[in-house]
Image (tube, rainbow, N blue to C red):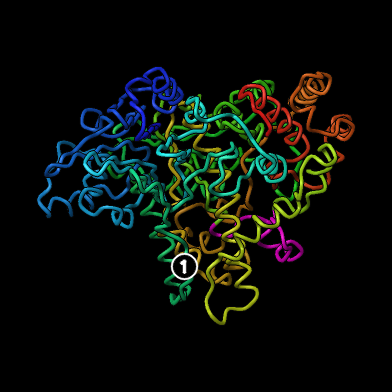
Amino acid sequence: MCGIAGWIDYNRDLRKYVDTINKMTGTLVRRGPDAQGIYLKENVCLMHRRLIVIDPENGIQPMTIKKGNTSYTIVYNGELYNTNELRDELLSFGYHFRGHSDTEVLLTAFIHWGESCLEKLNGIYAFGVWNDTSKTLFLARDRMGVKPLFVYTYSDGIIFGSELKTLLANPLVKPRIDNDGLKEIFLLGPGRTSGKGVIKGVTELKPGEFLVFKKNLGWKIRNYWSLKANEHTDDVKTTIEKTRFLITDAVKRQLVSDVPLCCFLSGGLDSSIISKIASDIYLSDNKGRLHTYSVNYIDNQQYFVKSIFQPNSDEEYIQMMVNEIASQHHEVLLDNEDLEKYLDDAVLARDLPGMADVDSSLLLFCREIKKKFTVAVSGECADEIFGGYPWYHNRDILFKDTFPWSQSLDLRQGILKEGLLVDGEEYVKQQYSDTVNKTDTLPGEGEFEIRMRQLFMLNLNWFMQTLLDRKDRMSMYNGLEVRVPFCDHRLVEYAFNMPWSIKSLNNREKGIVREAMKGILPDKIISRKKSPYPKTHNPKYLNAVKSRLQNILNDSNSPLVQLINKQKVQEIIDSDGKTISMPWYGQLMTGVQLMAYLIQVDIWMREYRIEIV
C-alpha cells in the first residue's frame, strides 16, 4: 500500500518544478512512510511513497521495465490477490521476474495485455503507467473503488494523486468550490457523487474506470467493469456452498503479507467470519495465534442505550469469538474528549468533512493498531451486498424515491442560509436517479426484484463508497493497510444476481451468509442482529462538541457562519441534538454527529483556505 502522484505536461519542463514536486510527494508521507521514489523527465513526473508490505527489495517504485525499445514505468497503490496466478501465466509467455512483488507482476501484465490486463486483476488498486515511447499515460482504479485516484486535467496537462491534498499542493489546482461543490458538502455529505472531487475542476476516476492521456489527443475515460444482471441458476444448497467458498477464498487470498497482519473483531457476523477463517489458516500454516482488535470508549457501557440500529453492545460477542478462535485479543479504549480533538486530523486525513467521530475514532483505533501491525483485515461492505441494513427490510422505506439513509432534505436545507443553494432538491434527485436508472435488470423481473437491484446499486455506489473512503483515509493516515474481503468483485457479482428470497434466507438480514457459516461460527454469533460500528454514548463527547460548535457560532470570522442559519444551528446545540428527527446520514450520524460534521466543515474551509466561486 502506498501513495501515488503524477504530473504530465507536454508544454513545460517539469525538471524546473522540483519544489512543487517535493510538496506533492510530501503530502503522501503518511500513506507511505517507508520509502520515496520519483521518476522525472522533461514532460513527466511520477511520484511514489511506499508502505512496505510485499517484497521490500524488489518492489521499489517507480518501477521501470523495458520491452524492446519501449520503457514502461509504473506507480501503484494497492494489492493484487491473484499475483501468483498472473505470474505463472506470464512466465508461460517467456517473461522473467526479479522478485515476488505484485508491482512487477502488474506492470508486466500491462506490458503484455495492455488495458485488457484489468479484466484479469483480483485486488484493490489505483495505478499509473507511463509509456516513454508513445508519451502516453494510463491510469486505472479497481472495480469497487477501494483505492482512491483523483485527477485534474488542463490543456496539454494532467495531475493525479491518491488524495485531494496532493493535487492542491500544485499551484495549478486552486482550493475553490462552486454551487455544486456546496451541494455535495451540505446536501449529500459525507457521501459524494461518484467521480466528483468537490474541488472545482477535480474529478475522481470512478470504480471500474481507466483513463488514457496522450499528446495532441487529450484524455479519454472508459469503463472496464460494471455489474450486469444475469439469471441466478443455482439452487439454495448450491448458493450456500458457493457463498461460503467465495467468502473463504477472498479472505484466504487477502492474508498474504511479508509484514505482521491482524484482524478487526467487533463480535458482529462479518468481522467474526473473517477472524475465524484467518485464525484457522494461521493455525494450519503454523503461523501462531491470530491477533485481533476491537474498539470501545471509556465508560461506554455505563451510558449505552439500545436502539433499532444498535440493539446490544459488543463485549459479550467479542469475548465469545476470542474464546472460539483463541486469538490474542487487544481492546483499544478511546478517550471521549480525544474524539472531538481529532476531528481536525480526520478532516486532514479525508481532505473533506467526513463522518465526524465515526472517522476520528477509526483514526485513533488505527493509530494504536499501527504500533504493532502494518496490515489489518476488516469486514466492511457485507451489509451493502447482502442486505444487512434496516432499509432493505422496511417496506415503508424500501420504495421511497430517494436515498434511504437520508430520506429528507428538510434538515439539511434548514440549517443553511436561505437562498444559498440553487436547485438543491433537483441536484440530489438527479444524483439519485442517475444511479437508479443505470441499474441493470433482466427482462420480466418484477417490481420488487428490480427495486432490490436498485437498492443494491445505491448502497454500492454511495453508502459503501463513503465507508471505503473513511477506511482508506483513516487507516492510511497512520500508515496502516486495511483489506476488505467482502469487496472481492466475484462475491459482489454473485450477490447482485442472488434473488432476495435466497439472500434473505429465513427472513433474516444477510440470511444466506448466516446459513453459509453454520457449523463454522458459534450459533449466538450467527443469530446476532446487526450492530454497527461502535459509537460513544458518553455525554463528555457531546459536551465537547457542543462547546466547540458554540465557539464557532460566536466567531464572526468563521467561514461556516457565512453559510448557515445560526438560529437553527443554535436550536440544535441547545437541544443536545434532540430536535433532529431524521439521521444526517443513516444510523451512524445522528444529532451529535451533525454538530461535529458542521465543525468539520469549518475546519476544512479554514485549513484548506476554501474559496467559494
- Regarding residue 331, the answer to whether it shows in the image is no
Say whether residue 391 is magenta: yes
Question: Foreground residue, 376 or 414?
Answer: 414
Say whether residue 169 is magenta: no
Question: Foreground residue, 39 or 499?
Answer: 39
Q: Residue 474 vs residue 212: left or right?
A: right
Residue at 46% x, 73% y: name it: 230
Q: Position of residue 567 (x, y in %)?
A: 90, 32
Question: Foreground residue, 460 or 172?
Answer: 172
Residue closest to the far bottom: 444
Magenta span: 385-404
Under mark 1, the amino acid is Lys
Q: Residue 563 vs residue 261: left or right?
A: right
Q: Position of residue 341 (x, y in %)?
A: 66, 20
Q: Name the residue under label 1.
A: 228
Judge whether 285 appears above or below 335 on screen: below
